Amino acid sequence: MYRSHTCGELRLADINKEVSLAGWVQTVRKFGSITFVDLRDRYGITQLLFSESLNATLDANPLGRNLCCR
């Protein structure tokens, strides 16, 4: 399977579980040391939060249209 959950399917019960999502980047918002990414698929939206330690990686490798996250 390519993903374990669809976007919009995650709930509080999924905290601390490893999940795989697939979709496209709808919006990227940078606020200083953190970055928010809205990942969308045909079922909904999941908001991803990238901390300061990953911002340099995001700047070096910008997110494309298709994204798969673990």
Image: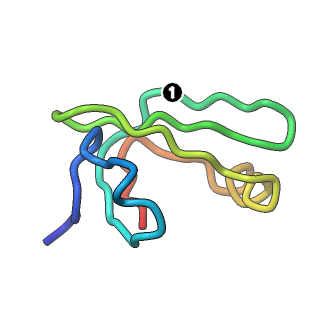
Residue most toward the front?
A: 13
How many circles with numbers are drawn on the protein? 1
Q: Position of residue 53 (x, y in %)?
A: 80, 61
Displayed quadrant of residue 65: top left
Q: Please, is residue 2 above or below residue 67 in the view?
A: below
Q: Which residue occupies 34% across, 33% down?
A: 45
Q: Name the residue at 23% across, 56% down.
A: 5
Residue in the image at 54% along x and 38% along y: 37
Rendered location of residue 66, percent (x, y):
36, 47
Q: Quadrant of the C terminus?
A: bottom left
- Of residues 25 and 51, the one drawn nearer to the viewer in this rendering: 51
Give, as a three-letter code, the residue at label 1: Thr
Q: Looking at the image, which is closer to me, 39 or 58?
A: 39
Residue 44 spot, x, y in % from top left: 25, 32
Picture layout, residue 6 above or below residue 57:
above
Q: Residue furthest right?
A: 32
Between 27 and 60, which is closer to the camera in this rendering? Answer: 27
Q: Secondary structure at mark 1?
A: strand
Residue 2 x %, y %? 19, 67
Which residue, given by chain and number where applicable, does mark 1 sit on? 27
Q: How dense is the environment of label 1, judged by Cα within 10 Å: few (below 14), some, or many (20 and up)?
A: few
